Image (spheres, rainbow, N blue to C red):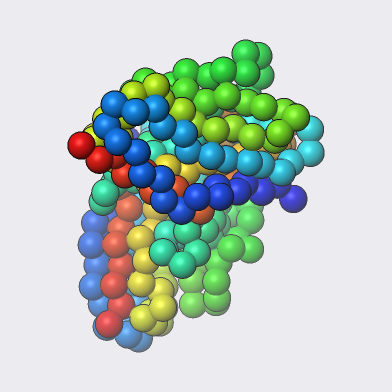
Amino acid sequence: AQSVAQPEDQVNVAEGNPLTVKCTYSVSGNPYLFWYVQYPNRGLQFLLKYITGDNLVKGSYGFEAEFNKSQTSFHLKKPSALVSDSALYFCAVRPPNSGNTPLVFGKGTRLSVIA
Amino acid sequence: DAGVIQSPRHEVTEMGQEVTLRCKPISGHNSLFWYRQTMMRGLELLIYFNNNVPIDDSGMPEDRFSAKMPNASFSTLKIQPSEPRDSAVYFCASTLQGSLGGYTFGSGTRLTVV
């Protein structure tokens, strides 16, 4: 069965510094990978996805993520963090060619950007 | 499109009462998912529907929970009787089956059972 691990419950970073939120996955074959963000009292919002092609994926709000097959990772990155990036971030995975098998979400990582 | 619409946004009820949560998916989406979010367990899939048909309800915690999707534009999640441990935020999400897009989530219903 597929699974996702987000090893950090909390990430703190100073405004203007680069940020990384980590995600590793376990799935047979080449997975479909997603990042979502949740702001307080809101639903999850789609940030970006990797399906195939270039390992570096660019998404909303200046975020990007790099698919690394050998390390089974899909870390979320941003070159310069903003205070407004403070939120809960979820990584999700789905096996390829799985029809509409639901996404499996990680437990989430709370990002706090300090001014 | 107004997105996925959930109601109510907040619900406070007494233990033992019936609770009904509602969801209107995005028009044209034919897959609908109910998730529950708690601090302890994170985001859990409860049940999902394709073309109004329940596909997998193995995540439904107990027989007290039931979900229906009578048509393509409406779904309900019912808890009867409710218990304090059901307190959580319940999210509905929709997508187009077979697409490679992500899900669109509603704003959630925060349920408190006292």
> Which residue is at a point 29% across and 26% down the rendered structure image?
A16
- Quarter where residue B73 is shown: top left
In the displayed structure, does residue A114 sit left or right of residue B55?
left
Give the side of residue A36 with respect to residue A115, left or right: right
Establish if A69 lies above or below B6: above
Q: How many marks?
A: 0
The residue under the point 66% across, 48% down is A3
Q: List x then y, in percent, for residue B107.
A: 30, 47
When asked about the image quadrant of residue A32, the answer is top right
Location of residue B29 in the rendering, given as x and y in whole percent from the top left corner: 47, 34
Image coordinates for residue B33, horizontal then vertical, percent: 50, 49
The one of A47 and A79 positioned closer to us in this rendering: A79
Q: Residue furthest bottom?
A: B16
Q: Nearer the viewer, residue A86 or B67?
A: A86
Q: Residue furthest top?
A: A54
Where residue B79 appears, as percent x and y from the top left, is 41, 73
Residue at 47% across, 43% down: A90
Residue B25 in sight in this render:
no
Answer with left or right where residue A1 lies relative to residue A114. right
> Residue at image x 23%, y 73%?
B12
Quadrant in the picture for the C terminus of chain A: top left
**Residue A86 vertical position relative to residue B101 in the rendered view, above or below:** below
Q: Is residue A105 above or below residue B77?
A: above
Q: Nearer the viewer, residue A112 or B84?
A: A112
